[in-house]
């Protein structure tokens, strides 16, 4: 979440807190955003992001209308995927918008509200509700950039409420990203698109809301720890976890790699409560039809997963509790998760706190329907309960 205010505390993206400095162009009433400490890619006066669940908030007064000035990266019509957003005014859903028609446009002015009383202050929150590049087989830059806000000549910024102290990080796939959870009809034949992905209704988002926590999420459909599903490219979630912008690959010969300027600094935001990792479904699905994939998949899966957990533990320290989830779309990798848990204290830190979250039962039909085999919003709510 990026919080924009005249005297607000450190604020953040993906709930990674980010100090911002505001300046005002009086002639145009264009509020420009300058990042001083970034968990995001900074370009000029813009803040770039692509993760699901990113929120940008600001409190405005003295203006009857406000628009956001934004752009989206990507010039290839075959690779460009629209991003979808919710807009909340004073915590109430006001409108939605998407970037379907933004390709090739230099800047887009997105109306957020109009016809408001200029004497009243209003908190505006823009929430990204889709993953970095929806279900993309080949990853290309697909991030959005917010450059600032426009409003009436009397526009001023007001203070925002204090930020939550609790911090939760999620690392996952389509289950965590809310893939297809808002499909209508919701059944085994649901057609899944970016338009019916609602991260704000996902179990990850609902968990953070219930606990009143900063929520940092890296989740992407079709991606696994050691093997991807569904003809996805070689880039794995264990690669993407290292990135600031998930959709920005290395410019070299390794598409799964990450350029130095796009590496995330794990010291800048440490989850002090827990890390929830739900990965493995795509590793299993990606080897469907192969005889006894456990002979070659699970040793590689186990080793890569253990390396991921070890790296996270060394980056975050023993104050962070790790929760490793299995299910609900497959239980085939649960034994591997248990193996990783048993090995982790030996290979990482002796005081590491790690536990199992069994989610295998949630698609048995008693918690709600499945949309194309994925948790519906109703199931998501049960998983977050």
Image (spheres, grey):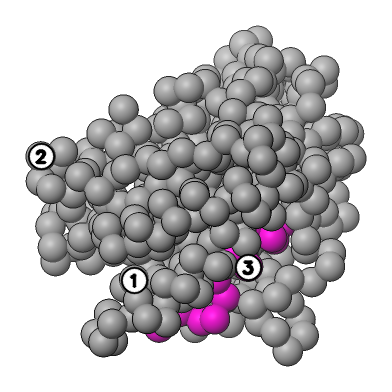
Quarter placement of the N terminus: top right
**What whole-number distance in Å separates the C-alpha atoms at marks 2 and 3?**
35 Å
**What whole-number distance in Å separates the C-alpha atoms at marks 2 and 1?**
24 Å
Residue at image coords 49%, 50%: 342
Q: Residues within 10 Å of mark 1 (few under 14, many from 20)?
A: many
Q: Position of residue 147 (x, y in %)?
A: 75, 48
**What whole-number distance in Å separates the C-alpha atoms at marks 3 and 1?**
18 Å
Position of 312 compared to 230: left or right? right
Q: Residues within 10 Å of mark 3 (few under 14, many from 20)?
A: many
Mark 1 = which residue? 284
Quarter placement of the C terminus: top left
Q: Is residue 276 magenta?
A: no
Magenta stretch mostly in which secondary structure?
loop
Mark 2 = which residue? 366
Q: Is residue 237 magenta?
A: yes
Label located before the other in sequence (2 or 3): 3
Position of 203 compared to 89: left or right? left
Q: Position of residue 365 (x, y in %)?
A: 10, 46
Residue at image coords 87%, 55%: 44
Residue 284 can be seen, yes or no: yes
Residue at image coords 38%, 40%: 357
Q: Is residue 293 above or below residue 15?
A: below
Front one among 58 and 378: 378
Label located before the other in sequence (2 or 1): 1
Residue 112 can be seen, yes or no: no
Position of 313 compared to 212: left or right? right
Indicate the secondary structure of the residue bearing disc 2.
Answer: loop
Q: Position of residue 337 (x, y in %)?
A: 42, 54
In the image, the segment drawn in magenta is 230-244
Residue 239's disc is 3
């Amino acid at each position: 979440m990026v919080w924009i205010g005249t005297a607000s505390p450190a604020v953040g993206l993906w709930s990674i807190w980010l100090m911002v400095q505001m300046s005002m162009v009086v002639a145009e009433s264009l509020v420009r955003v300058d990042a001083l400490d970034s968990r995001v890619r900074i370009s000029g006066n813009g803040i770039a992001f692509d993760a699901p669940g990113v929120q940008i908030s600001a409190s405005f007064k003295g203006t009857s209308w406000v628009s956001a000035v934004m752009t989206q990266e990507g010039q290839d019509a075959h690779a460009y995927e629209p991003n979808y957003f919710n807009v909340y005014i004073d915590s109430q859903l006001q409108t939605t918008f998407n970037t379907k028609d933004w390709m090739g446009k230099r800047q887009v002015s997105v109306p957020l509200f109009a016809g408001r009383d200029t004497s009243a202050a209003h908190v505006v929150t823009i929430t990204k509700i889709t993953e970095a590049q929806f279900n993309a087989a080949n990853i290309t830059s697909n991030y959005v950039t917010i450059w600032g806000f426009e409003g009436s000549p009397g526009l001023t910024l007001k203070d925002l409420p204090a930020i939550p102290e609790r911090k939760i990080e999620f690392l996952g796939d389509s289950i965590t990203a809310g893939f297809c959870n808002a499909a209508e009809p919701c059944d085994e034949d649901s057609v899944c698109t970016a338009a019916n992905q609602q991260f704000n209704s996902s179990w990850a988002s609902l968990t953070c809301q219930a606990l009143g926590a900063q929520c940092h999420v890296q989740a992407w459909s079709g991606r696994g720890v050691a093997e991807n599903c569904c003809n996805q490219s070689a880039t794995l979630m264990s690669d993407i976890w290292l990135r600031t912008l998930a959709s920005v690959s290395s410019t070299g010969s390794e598409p799964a790699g990450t350029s130095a300027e796009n590496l995330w600094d794990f010291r800048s935001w440490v989850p002090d409560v827990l890390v929830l990792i739900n990965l493995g479904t795509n590793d299993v699905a990606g080897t469907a039809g192969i005889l006894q994939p456990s002979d070659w998949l699970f040793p590689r899966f186990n080793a890569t997963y253990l390396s991921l957990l070890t790296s996270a533990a060394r980056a975050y320290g023993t104050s962070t509790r790790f929760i490793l989830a299995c299910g609900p779309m497959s239980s085939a990798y649960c034994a591997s998760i248990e193996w990783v848990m048993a090995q982790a204290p030996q290979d990482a830190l002796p005081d590491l706190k790690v536990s199992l979250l069994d989610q295998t039962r949630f698609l048995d039909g008693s918690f709600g329907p499945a949309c194309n085999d994925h948790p519906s919003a109703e199931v998501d709510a049960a998983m977050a309960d």
